[in-house]
Amino acid sequence: MTPTKTLLLCTCEKTQAVSPEALKAASAAGQVIVVDELCGKDMATAAEHLSGAGEVLIACGQQAALFERLGEDVQAEVGQSAPLSTIDIRDRAGWSAPDADPKRLHAKQAALMAGAQLPAAMAPAKLIQSSGVCCIVGPTDQAIRMAELVQDELGVTCVVSDSGPVQLPSARYDLARGKLTAAKGALGNFKLEFSQLQMLNPAGRGAPAYGDAKTTARSECDIFIDLRGGAPAFPHYQKRNGYFWADPAKSGELERIALTARERVGEFEKTVYFRLEESLCAHSRANQPGCTRCLDVCSTEAIFSAGDHIQIDSDICAGCGTCAAVCPTSAITMNETPFESITKALDVMARTYREHAGEAPRLVFHSLGAGAEAIAYLARYHDGLADDLIPFGLEQIDRIGHAEILAAFGAGYAEVLMLADSELDRRAVAAEVELAQAMLVGTHNSPSRIRVIAAEHLGEAGDNAGRLSEPVLLVGGRRDITRVAATAMADKIEAPIPLPAGAPYGAIEIDSDKCTLCLACVSLCPTGALGDHPDRPEVQFTENACVQCGVCESTCPETAITLKPQLDLSKAALSARALHGEDPFECIQCGKPFGVASTINRIVEKLENQHWMYTKSDNVQLIKMCDDCRVKAQFHGDSAPMASGERPRVRTSDDYRDH
């Protein structure tokens, strides 16, 4: 018999109301127990159930560490401990304004509980080895001071940037003087470049001296401590594992860095956040530039060009997910927060809320760091989240793109808010929010249904009075769900929706006066949006497959192609249509169709009586022949330019028999 799952609910000294029936159904628990102070006078209840065999789910996120230690104590005492998981429903749904609707609060609690029961995606990990080789760069006094702080655990080399005095050189670390010119890598694999590098000569009496300067020098290290006081060596340096930058405006920086840097020795697990399918990448084709969206948004410079596709350095990648949010072909997907997991959770929570509240909820995306802290602070000291606002936490909110936003509307949310931790977050999501708002405008919805907000606006009531579409089935990839959700939100399908420049949806326009139907664009299109006709010179286009990568535009030798960002929700966008085509030219000898009529006529017009080879000659007729007939005409006939004399008769043995 399968052990019963137990749900332990706490009213937190009667400061929140819970609905045991709704939460029991949402958590699929066999039994529900409600107490008032699970972390205090009722802790014995938790210990009792942790000593059993069934799974225990405790609805308290604040004291999760306490209950984990309690489980360890139970394990030590009775030899076993039940599987334990915790969830916060208090800060996110229990503590709210005095006039909050209890029905909404209970519906939100049930929605959060149901979403938490979904299986979490597992991300693979790689091993990173750090031997503790450390390079410290900065002024002499600070570099030596830092070396003294970390020399017991790390193998240190100081590269100083000034001519400060060195009184007593230590044998426990090396000292050099030079200027840092380049840096790349991450924990366990930093590569540094210096100019005018001089090594300290520790021998001799008197003040130590530096040796001869090397014009350029390279070094490798596991840990990089930057004390120069200027700009950090890496963008978003906080996300660069193994790199420590000292803020000159803060006191105690050296001690703080030393405390952490000393621990960066040994073997570490590094999460591989992404999955890259190179065959889907539309970055480039045949050296013709195409999509660079991920390169443009990567804050850590972990992405670089590798020819026809991009590559991602897993050592540097910090897992923000911005690249996956903007990738138009899903060549980049996230292991920790795959699109399918996000849409599934959004759908389950919205459906659960509607079942209990009878109305559409609103949604707020927030970070699990500062965003979650802001929600907890708002709940404890103010009125908390609005009673109809369901929070959805991720490591970074720039993981959310237009497809996730449209999926939320497809699931039935009335509004989608994004809680920005900083101005940097606002800039990171601005383009995707603008794209989603353009789709709302095109479907006759208010663009204010998507907003980037600050924490002080989390308690504000929303507007659920607008027109809402019926929830749709969120099945398929990012482009599929975007199209389905936008179609459901539209009153009726009219003209294509105009989108901002750079949008990954759209059409292409071909200038028929310029196009020679060379079909170079067709051969290089990475998504198959462009095709040809099997029987005639023609460029065909399937708009739904076009990601506006620009390869066709950069490839066209006649500059005849223009990108047109738009979203066509009609069925016509799903099928190929002719953009430009002509009748083929028919061979004047055999009548076989070949080439493009306008191109052949243009060549004849430019060469006939304009070039010495085609003046007072029948050579111009060769241009009007197919390959086979052209060869025959050149080698046979009295006036053929490559004709030779009559071929000798083949002799046989009979010719010699009579002699």
Image (tube, rainbow, N blue to C red):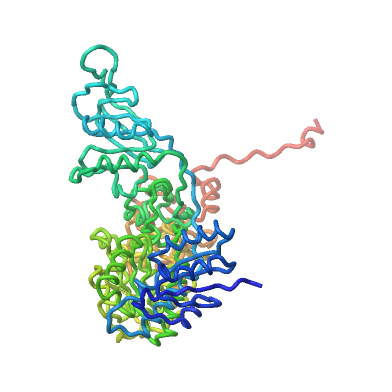
Q: State whether residue 647 is above or below residue 33.
A: above
Q: Is residue 107 left or right of residue 144?
A: right
Q: State whether residue 304 is above or below residue 198.
A: below
Q: State whether residue 20 is above or below residue 546.
A: below
Q: Quadrant of the N terminus?
A: bottom right
Q: x and y percent of residue 435 in the render?
A: 31, 69
Q: Residue at x 43, y 85 (%)?
A: 356
Quadrant hosting residue 82: bottom right
Q: x and y percent of residue 123 in the render?
A: 49, 56
Q: Residue at x 45, y 80 (%)?
A: 352
Q: Camera-side residue: 335 or 105?
A: 105
Q: Quadrant of the C terminus?
A: top right
Q: Residue furthest front?
A: 41
Q: Residue at x 27, y 62 (%)?
A: 421
Would you say residue 337 is visible in this rendering?
yes
Q: Camera-side residue: 401 or 643?
A: 401
Q: Residue furthest right?
A: 657
Quadrant hosting residue 19: bottom left
Q: x and y percent of residue 54 in the render?
A: 58, 69
Quadrant hosting residue 246: top left
Count of all numbered marks drawn on residues in the image: 0
Would you say residue 512 is visible in this rendering?
no
Q: x and y percent of residue 388 in the render?
A: 34, 80
Q: State whether residue 555 is above or below residue 45.
A: above
